[in-house]
Amino acid sequence: MNWSRTLTVARTDVKQLVLAKDFWMPMAILGSIFFVIVPLVLLFSITSLGDVEAVQNIANTLEVLPQKAQDQIKGDTPQGRTSYALAVFLFAPMAVVVPLTISTAVGAATLVGERERGTGEFLAHSPAATKEIYLGKLLASLLPGYFTTMVGFTAYSLIVNLIVGPEVGGWFFPTTQWWLLMIWVLPGFLLIGLSLVLRLSAKVKSTAAAQQASGLITLPLIAVSYAQASGAIYGTPTTTIVIGAIAWTIGITSTWRGMGAVKRQRLLGVADGV
Amino acid sequence: MGRVSLHPVPPAVSLLGVNKSFNDVPALVGVNVVAPDGQITVLLGPNGAGKTTAIRIVTGAMTPDAGTVRTLGLDPDVDGEEVRHACGVVSAKPALYDRLSGHDNLRYAAELHGVDKRIIDDRIWAAAGRFGIAQALDSQVGGYSTGMKTRLALARSVLHEPQLLLFDEPTSGLDPESAQAVLQLIRDMTSDGHTVVMCTHHLVEAEGLADHIVVLDTGTDLVSGKPGDLIHQFWPDDSVEISVEADTSLEDLTVLDGVIRTEPSKHGIRVILENPDVTPDVVDALVRAGHRIRMVNPHEPSLEELYFAVRRSARDLGEAATEEVMS
């Protein structure tokens, strides 16, 4: 295993993505919608409305949250408590949805795309081992989604602290649970999704087919991740660490098995009728 | 004083009895290809003959179903990384990354081949300069012409200083001028000791370039060897093509000493001779017989003629075998 070659494959792929405006523009828009526009509108509306009936009603619904979560909610006013709960608990799943959507879109096209463009021939004749190509491609697919999410998360943290902070006595975000979610749990789920999607990308005949098939994998995975992300935020740090560890274990196992999916003949587009 | 090796130099490439099928469709059927070290070997054949498959098997990019493959003495299935490191490949489509610049494409290849980072840039500029593409190195490859892409692909193939160069239809899609330039560059490369294996279906390209040829058709090698030897095998006797003004019969030439036979040709008649020294006697006899000679052209069979003669011979053999089975 030559890590230098793996990083070369990853770096070159990322460079191509950066140069593709038609790729990163939608990615930036998606991140902005989830991390900036929606939270900004919602949190700003709630904190600006004051102690009106609508806000009171939303505050009442917070009682459905687990007791441990309710105990964590800060703020003395209904709008303060409501905006805190929204910021800390309800937006957590989007932190998983955004990177999974972006990374699987990149990953689905990565190997089959080489074949479609004819550049698979170059890789097949290169000394790079198929495992190195697979891991390089996986890294190159993971990084854009994770990077976008971390940039979005930074913006989201600022928005939350600037809008909700004054209502609850100062800057409070990210909480310990959010740090664990972003740094420990999220990459594990990304690894699971990408290892599966890259296997698909290595086997299907076209990028369109890869996109379709990856939807079948990512939708259930997003649902599971959504639930687990919520659990990670509502539960204790130990719960979050355990959820992350399980995700990493599954992700690494799946990646290990996936490394065998790339065959040189597949890069040429001639294996098993491809 | 140079030393004389007591051992023959092993071939750079040898495929022996190689079979390869795709979904039960045979692409190579017991193919034998031997490419001598330090020479240009040209694989000749129509589309679908199995040339590209053979190249892919040489580097280990594809695994044969049966047969023995040795590239630079190694088995590509076992020592794939080492084999591919020693090969420079230009595929039929240049296989370049359109969004990247020419420089980035070359850097990618150099890094995958493990070229020392301290000398990568020197190598890139040297290779680009050699193939006349240095001025476009900073531009995106998507904007390159077909000729520029081929030049860049050629530059990429030599960056890591490989021992064996494999070119699959390197002039495909090029205008005649660019094609000639590319062929000249290939010729230049062998002058510094590289072994080249090149696929083409353009017979004119192989003419004068090939030290060794292998004619492939429908996944089988029909014939292989040095062009001169093969031509001698198919045309063992010398011949001269003669054209006279009047449309008169020249069949009586067979009575002359040294003339084996005559046969009609494109411009007149082809006279098959025991040796080329008889030519003046033939011309003299014709003049004395009152013919006004328009053209006397010693016939040197081209690679094109050889190719068609080989294919015709293979077809005849096939038909004969079928008839034998039927009877």
Image: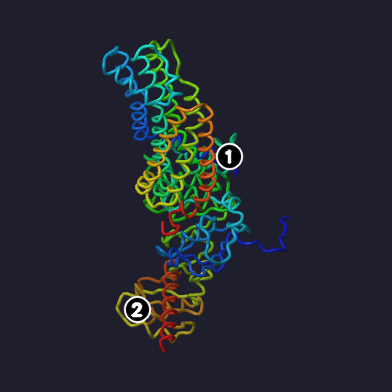
Q: Looking at this rendering, what residue extends furthest in the left direction?
A: A53
Q: Quadrant of residue B79?
A: bottom right
- Answer whether residue A195 is visible to the viewer in this image: yes
**Residue B173 relative to residue B191: left or right:** left
> Which secondary structure lies at badge 1?
helix
Callout 2 crowding tier (Cα within 10 Å): few <14, some 14–19, many ≥20: some
Q: Position of residue A105 (x, y in %)?
A: 39, 40
- Looking at the picture, which amino acid does disc 1 mark? Trp
- Looking at the picture, which amino acid does disc 2 mark? His
- Answer whether residue B134 is visible to the viewer in this image: no
Residue at the location (48% across, 25% down)? A177
Q: Is residue B259 above or below residue A73?
A: below
Which chain is indicated by disc 2? Answer: B
Q: Is residue B291 above or below residue B82?
A: below
Q: Position of residue B181 (x, y in %)?
A: 44, 49
Cα distance between the residues tagged 2 and 1: 80 Å
Q: Position of residue B55 (x, y in %)?
A: 50, 58
> Which secondary structure lies at badge 2?
loop
Q: Is residue A91 above or below residue B304?
A: above
Q: Nearer the viewer, residue A161 or B315?
A: A161
Q: Is residue A101 above or below residue B167?
A: above
Q: Nearer the viewer, residue A222 or A86?
A: A86
Q: Nearer the viewer, residue B291 or B252?
A: B252
Q: Position of residue A250 (x, y in %)?
A: 52, 42
**Residue A201 relative to residue B110: left or right:** left
- Residue underneath mark 2: B291
Q: Which mark is residue A3?
A: 1
The answer to the question of whether label 2 and label 1 lie on touching residues, with beta carbons closer than 8 A, is no
Q: Quadrant of the N terminus of chain B?
A: bottom right
Which chain is indicated by disc 1? Answer: A
